[in-house]
Structures are given as structure tokens and as C-alpha cells.
Image (tube, rainbow, N blue to C red):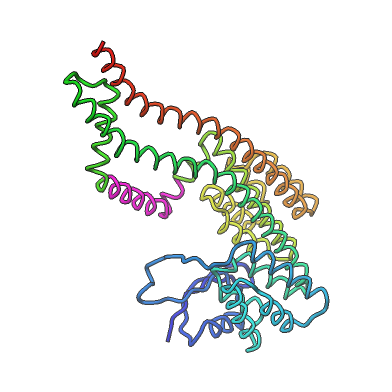
């Protein structure tokens, strides 16, 4: 019988964790729900994979989830029964992976699971934000509104990611092709010219040519060593980045980087305010909303500030105080949140902050794209020009000796 590790919150908001043995995940969900717990995490423990944390691709994108949420919301608003909605969504779904998962969700609902419980069985596709919003929609009888807000949230998240991905595709592609071309020139072209020059003259080759030949010999004879060393360094860095200490330090240094640091901060603030605003607007309890937001912050320094805000609310204080004390969030953000707390319209303020920082990130991405292009041109000119010069200098030297 498999064992399931769970994390829950009781009706007072206290966090609890443990494990249960059951025939399947549905039984665990039912037991925890019957005990009055709100599930925040549920995973099956396996003796072979218990200590290995590998996330495989699900084949379902944010765009797929956003479209699914929008279609689901429209059907619910039209008064179509829940199981009929799932039937239609399953039949028209083009993504094979999502179609398979929807079939499993439909089966779970038919067997008596609530919709949020059925979605919770697929945490790699539907994040805690989605599951908690669906649960809030079920409890409050506003499922259509919850799905609409989810669709809007994922649409904006997808749009922002695509903007960043599109801006980075060009420089990365150019850089990769430049590295390939430079390696081809150094390994195959430069040695041929050097051998030809050596056959014509016994004079010492120019310094730049000798440097290029040294680099060429290294790449020819020690390329395997360089590849292994690079892989080991990347593996070590990845392990360190995944550790709590390493992630915290790296995320802190990232925020201190010129140009990129402010962009990462604005991206984190936009994600934090949008996620929290979406959850609060849908009726999710503030403590649980902050916990979900903390887990999806994407930056350990920002997550630490959110955790302090959550503890502050437990102690009966405000959200804005610890966010200000963290020194991470800009004054405009903390002041607008403070105004939202005082006026009772915090979800509206959070949405406005998110929209503002979404626009700021898009502007910064466009600016970075414009700045990167001339730097790439200069980089290519220096590298390729250096290789060409290392070939041409011996020619001029040989030409002088002939005369």
C-alpha cells in the first residue's frame, strides 16, 4: 500500500504535515477533507524515488491552462452541468497530454471527488494557485468568476514569459552560432594557415597568431577535458542553486546585478501582487493566499519578505509593515498595499500594482533587446576580427620578407 506525504492547514490556519497509507490518492484527500483540513501539498512517497526530486515535462503550457480555464468559465456561465462541461472540454482538447489528464479528472469527479480534489491529483499541471482558486469557487459558489480570474492570470503570465523568451531568443541564437563558427575557424582553418606560413619561413610568427594557435591546440587536444569540466561545474552550480543557502545567496546576488537585477525584481513584484490579488479576490483566506504566493514567488529573497508578512498577519499586524522592513519591495508597492489595507480594497490595489509592473517589465525587455544588439555586433567584430588578424599578420610579414 503506497504512502502519501501531505501538508495541510487546519481551520485556524495552522500548518500541519505528515503521511498516510492508502490505496490511492483519492482516499487520502477524502480523509483529510473529512477532518476539516485544507490541503496545500500531497505527494506519493516511493522507496525508489523518495529522495530524488526530478520534474519531468508535462507537455502542458501556461497557454493551454489559460485557454482551458477560459472555455470552462464560459460553459459554467452558460449553465452547463459540470460533468457535461468536462465531457465537452475533453472531446475538443487538442493537447494529448491535457486530454489524458482531463479524462482522469472527469473520472475522479464521477466517482465522487470534488473538482478541486480531482485537479489536486495533477500538481505538475495545475499549480497550487489553480487548485486553491477552484476550491474557493466551489465553496463560494462563484466557480465561473474563479475560472475567469485564473484565465486572466495565466494569460498575463504567459504573455510576459513569451515577451522575455522572444527577447532572449535572438541574442542566444547569435551567440551560439558565433561560438560554433569560432570553434570551426580555430580548430580547422587557423592551423592550416599556420602550417603554410611555417613552410615558407622559419621566422617566428606574430604574437596574436601564436596565441590563436595555442587556443586552437587546446581545443583540438583538450576539448573533452573542457567539456567534462564544464559539465561538472554546471552540475555543481545546479546542486548549490537548489540548496536553501545557495538559492538564497544566488537570488540575492541576481537582484544586485546592474540592469538585470531591477528587471528580476519588477518581475517578482508583478508575480507576487498578481497571484495574491487573484487569490484574495476569489475569497481564498489571506494566510493561505500568502503561503501559495510565497511558494510561487520564484526568488528566495522575495519569498522571505512574503513569509514575514504571513507571520505578521498571524500576530495580528499588517501586511505592508514586514514588506517594507524586508528592503526588497519598492516604496510604491508597500505604500499602495498599506492604502489598500486601510481602505479595504487590497485586491484592487494589488491588481493595479501588477499591471503597472507588467508594463515596466515589458518596457525594460524592449530596452534590453535594443542594447544587446550593438554589444553582440561588437563582440562578433572583436572575436572574428582577432581571428582574421591572426591569419593576415603572418601574410604581411611574409610579404615584407619576400620584398
179 falls in the magenta region: no
Q: Nearer the viewer, residue 266 or 252?
A: 266
Residue 34 relative to residue 376: left or right: right
- The answer to which image quadrant residue 147 occupies is bottom right
Instruction: Give the percent coordinates (x, y) of residue 381.
Output: 45, 28
Q: Nearer the viewer, residue 136 or 59?
A: 59
Task: Provide the residue span drawn in magenta.
Answer: 226-249
Could you tell me which quadrant the N terminus lies in? bottom left
Q: Nearer the viewer, residue 329 or 143?
A: 143
Could you tell me which quadrant the C terminus lies in? top left
80 relative to 131, above or below: below
240 falls in the magenta region: yes
Q: Which residue does the image show at 28% across and 16% down from the upper left? A: 399
Judged from this view, the residue extending furthest toward the right is 78
- The answer to which image quadrant residue 41 occupies is bottom right
- The answer to which image quadrant residue 148 occupies is bottom right
366 relative to 296, above or below: above
The main secondary structure of the magenta stretch is: helix
Instruction: Give the percent coordinates (x, y) of residue 260.
Output: 55, 38
Instruction: Give the percent coordinates (x, y) of residue 163.
Output: 63, 48
Residue 237 relative to residue 10: left or right: left
Residue 227 relative to residue 95: left or right: left
Q: Nearer the viewer, residue 62 or 243?
A: 62
Instruction: Give the percent coordinates (x, y) of residue 169.
Output: 54, 46
Amino acid at each position: 500500500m503506497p504512502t502519501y506525504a501531505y501538508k495541510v492547514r487546519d481551520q485556524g490556519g495552522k500548518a500541519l504535515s505528515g503521511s498516510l497509507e492508502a490505496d490511492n490518492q483519492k482516499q487520502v484527500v477524502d480523509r483529510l477533507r473529512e477532518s476539516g483540513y485544507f490541503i496545500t501539498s500531497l505527494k506519493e512517497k516511493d522507496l525508489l524515488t523518495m529522495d530524488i526530486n526530478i520534474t519531468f515535462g508535462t507537455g502542458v503550457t501556461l497557454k493551454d491552462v489559460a485557454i482551458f480555464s477560459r472555455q470552462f468559465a464560459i460553459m459554467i456561465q452558460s449553465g452547463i452541468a459540470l460533468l457535461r462541461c468536462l465531457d465537452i472540454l475533453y472531446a475538443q482538447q487538442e493537447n494529448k497530454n491535457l486530454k489524458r489528464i482531463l479524462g482522469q479528472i472527469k473520472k475522479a469527479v464521477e466517482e465522487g471527488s470534488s473538482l478541486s480534489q480531482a485537479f489536486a491529483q495533477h500538481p505538475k499541471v495545475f499549480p497550487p494557485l489553480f487548485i486553491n482558486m477552484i476550491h474557493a469557487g466551489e465553496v463560494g459558489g462563484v466557480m465561473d468568476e474563479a475560472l475567469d480570474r485564473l484565465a486572466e492570470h495565466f494569460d498575463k503570465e504567459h504573455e510576459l514569459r513569451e515577451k522575455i523568451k522572444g527577447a532572449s531568443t535572438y541574442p542566444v541564437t547569435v551567440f551560439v552560432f558565433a561560438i560554433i563558427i569560432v570553434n570551426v575557424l580555430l580548430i580547422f582553418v587557423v592551423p592550416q594557415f599556420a602550417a603554410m606560413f611555417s613552410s615558407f619561413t622559419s621566422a617566428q610568427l606574430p604574437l596574436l597568431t601564436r596565441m590563436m594557435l595555442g587556443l586552437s591546440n587546446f581545443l583540438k587536444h583538450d576539448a573533452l577535458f573542457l567539456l567534462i569540466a564544464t559539465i561538472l561545474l554546471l552540475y555543481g552550480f545546479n546542486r548549490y542553486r537548489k540548496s536553501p543557502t545557495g538559492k538564497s545567496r544566488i537570488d540575492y546576488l541576481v537582484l544586485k546585478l546592474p540592469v538585470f537585477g531591477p528587471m528580476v525584481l519588477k518581475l517578482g513584484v508583478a508575480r507576487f501582487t498578481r497571484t495574491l490579488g487573484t487569490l484574495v479576490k476569489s475569497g481564498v483566506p489571506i494566510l493561505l493566499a500568502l503561503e501559495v504566493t510565497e511558494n510561487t514567488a520564484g526568488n528566495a529573497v522575495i519569498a522571505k519578505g512574503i513569509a514575514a508578512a504571513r507571520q505578521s498577519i498571524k500576530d495580528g499586524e499588517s501586511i505592508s509593515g514586514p514588506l517594507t522592513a524586508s528592503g526588497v519591495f519598492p516604496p510604491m508597492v508597500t505604500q499602495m498595499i498599506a492604502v489598500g489595507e486601510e481602505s479595504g480594497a487590497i485586491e484592487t490595489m494589488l491588481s493595479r500594482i501588477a499591471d503597472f509592473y507588467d508594463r515596466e517589465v515589458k518596457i525594460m525587455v524592449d530596452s534590453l533587446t535594443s542594447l544587446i544588439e550593438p554589444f553582440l555586433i561588437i563582440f562578433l567584430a572583436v572575436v572574428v576580427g582577432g581571428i582574421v588578424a591572426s591569419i593576415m599578420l603572418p601574410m604581411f610579414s611574409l610579404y615584407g620578407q619576400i620584398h
